Structures are given as structure tokens and as C-alpha cells.
Amino acid sequence: MSEALLAEDVRITGHGGDEVQAYLARPLAPDAVGHGAVVVIHHMPGFDWATKELTRRFAANGYLAICPNLYFREAPGAASDDAAATVRAAGGVPDERLVGDVAGAAAYLRALPESNGKVGVIGHCSGGRHAFLAACHLDLDAAVDCYGAFVVGDPPPGHPVKISSLLPIADRLSCPLLGLFGAEDKYPSPDQTAELEAALTALGKPFEFHTYADAGHAFFAVDRPGYRVAAATDGWQRIFDFFGRNLS
């Protein structure tokens, strides 16, 4: 199998018809047709190199992948840290706008000639919450929540981002869900993960959760102190197994 891929900036139609910057990565194999696709939702630090690297990793493994720049309206062309600060000061990305931008990204992927029509979504931290949110509003084929904060529970007083628990809309989950969590995390805590697990079980939703005993928040992030090799390695294997089953 050829490992050649193309990665480039593109423009998609996002929420409200807005033109939004996005980062597209796709395989360039001669037989690159019939591929599943993944919308990668960036974390609070923004549209950064780490998230673009994740996007390329999916392409290298045979998926069409796109990451919309959720901060493009507030800070077009700004460095990731500056853009994140601007958006955080405004209370974060509104849920409705997030859903619209992910819908636009999914539509862009489905329209590619190489696509098999199936689209999944993945996010880490705030992106994990956004992945769950999108899967409750859009017709998707798979969703991965990597330690998404405040899927269950509201932020503490003084938290800059204006969001609330998504548990009231869990009954709308449209697709299988994979959740990957750290036992030493506070947001989400193991108790919050257990609460979400109980709710999804009661609703009869298809899901699988894995919690790593030696990991806290951001254990996938290779450039942070919280990186945990064993948890991240196992987590990546589970992600590709999960998407392989649901997006092929």
C-alpha cells in the first residue's frame, strides 16, 4: 500500500453559510477510492500543528480526514494561542455553530470522489465534548470522545467557556461511540464517565469505554507532561479498530 498523501488548506461551507478554513489530508494511492472519512475536531489550544498531525495520521492509515478551524471567524490567520485566547474570552465556540461547522466538514468529505459516504468524528478534551455534541445532532457513522470535558457535569464557577452538560441530549446519539479516558482525570472524572456509561446503557446506545489506570488528562499529547505511552498506544489501536469496523 502506498503511503503517499496530500495535505492542504481548503475552504468549506460552515454554520450559517460561512466560509471556514479547514485542513484536509487524504491518501494518494492509485486505488484511493471507497475510503471512510473522519472529521477531526481540534482542542482548546486551537487549529495547531498537533491536530494537523492527527489529521495526517488518519490519511496515512487510509482515511479521508479534515479538521475545520473553529476559530477562523474570530481570528483568521492568527497564531493558535492568540486565536484560542480570543475565543476563550468570548465564552468559547457556541454549540450551534460547532454543529454547523462539523456538518459542513462532513458534507465536504462525503462529496469527495474517493469517499464511501461514511463519516466519523473524533476530538480530544473540548474536542471530545464537541464530537459527542455533533453525534447527537448529525447523522454520523462513528464518534470518538477522547476525555471530553463536560459531556457530563457543568463547568465550575469562573470557568471561561460557557457550556453545559450534554447528558440531556444523549438520547439523540446517532452512532456508535468510543470513549477513552484517564482514571486520574478530573474533567471528566471517573464518576462522570460512569454516569455517562449508565445513561447510555439505559438508552440502549452502542458504545465502548476504556479507562486507563495510569493516565490523566491529555494522555495522547506527545508534547505534554501528561503523555502516557502505554495508554496512547493502546488508545490508537482501539481508535483504528473502531473506525475500521464502522467506516469501512
Image: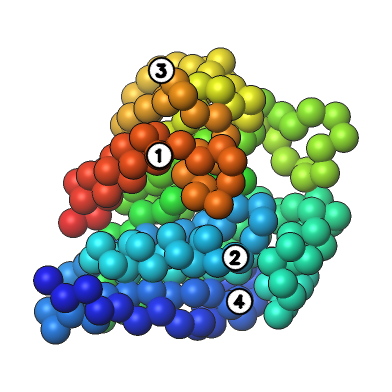
**Vertical comparison of 207 with 3: above or below:** above
Residue situated in front as seen by the camera: 49 or 91: 49
Q: How much space separates mark 1 and mark 3, taking CA atoms?
A: 34 Å
Q: Give x and y (percent) for residue 174.
A: 39, 43
User: Which label was assigned to residue 229?
Assistant: 1
| Residue where numbered disc 2 is placed | 48
Q: Are marks 1 and 3 in contact (CB under 8 Å)?
A: no
On the question of residue 190 being in view, the answer is yes
Q: Residue at x 50, y 83 (%)?
A: 10
First reached walking from the N terminus: tag 1 or tag 3: 3
Q: Are marks 4 and 3 in contact (CB under 8 Å)?
A: no
Q: How much space separates mark 2 and mark 4, taking CA atoms?
A: 15 Å
Q: Residue at x 53, y 61 (%)?
A: 50
User: Which label was assigned to residue 202?
Assistant: 3
| Residue where numbered disc 4 is placed | 20
* Image position of 26 (left or right of 156): left
Q: Secondary structure at mark 2?
A: loop
Q: How much space separates mark 4 and mark 1, taking CA atoms?
A: 34 Å
Question: Label 1 amino acid?
Answer: Val
Among the 4 quarters of the image, the one containing residue 75: bottom right
